[in-house]
Image (cartoon, rainbow, N blue to C red):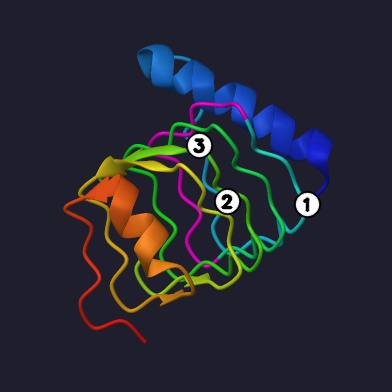
Amino acid sequence: MNQATVDKMIVEHEQWLDDHETGTRADFSNLDLSSNSFAYHDLSYAIFNGANLSRADFEDDILNGTSFVGAIMIATDLSYAAMFGTDFQYAELTNAFVDDIYGAVVDFRHCQIDDFEEISQHISDARFDDEV
């Protein structure tokens, strides 16, 4: 998917977050979104299940309640992202940039993650049991 289409979906999603009467909740499930930028947006409750997000940029995003179940996130930039109740189950987060992420109650079960220490320092109540 090209960046212009992604940008349009982000605008519609942020409109949906404002009042649920306008815009559309973003569902990026199973799409190839590699190398796209999502940075500096509120993507709370967006759906990225099964998406290829390799080398995508989520820097300084709000990702509350966002679902990344089964997403491929190799070398994805999550730096400075806020995440509360975010679901990364079964996602591949190898070589992901997780510097200064913050939040709580984030589900990383069954993930492939390189940097548990960095994540656990900044995410309270993170779930890491049964890591692959």
Q: Does residue 109 sit above or below 61 in this rendering?
A: below
The residue drawn where x is 31% and y is 52% is 121
The residue drawn where x is 58% and y is 55% is 97
The residue drawn where x is 58% and y is 70% is 72
Secondary element at image label 3: loop
- Per the model, the C-alpha gap separating discs 2 and 1 is 10 Å
The residue drawn where x is 64% and y is 34% is 39
Disc 3 designates what residue? Answer: 80
Kind of residue indicated by mark 1: Met
Q: Residues within 10 Å of mark 1 (few under 14, many from 20)?
A: few
Q: Does residue 57 sit above or below 14 in this rendering?
A: below
Secondary element at image label 1: loop
Q: Is residue 45 magenta?
A: yes
Q: Identify the mark nearer the N-term, 2 or 3.
A: 2
Spot occupied by residue 76 in the image (x, y as percentages of width and height): 63, 57
Kind of residue indicated by mark 2: Phe
- Per the model, the C-alpha gap separating discs 2 and 3 is 22 Å
Spot occupied by residue 96 in the image (x, y as percentages of width and height): 58, 62
Q: Residues within 10 Å of mark 2 (few under 14, many from 20)?
A: many
Q: Identify the mark nearer the N-term, 1 or 3.
A: 1
- Which of the 4 quarters of the picture holds residue 46? top left
Q: Which residues are magenta?
A: 40-50
| Image mark for residue 1 | 1
Disc 2 designates what residue? Answer: 28
Q: Is residue 120 left or right of residue 66?
A: left
- Which of the 4 quarters of the picture holds residue 111? bottom left
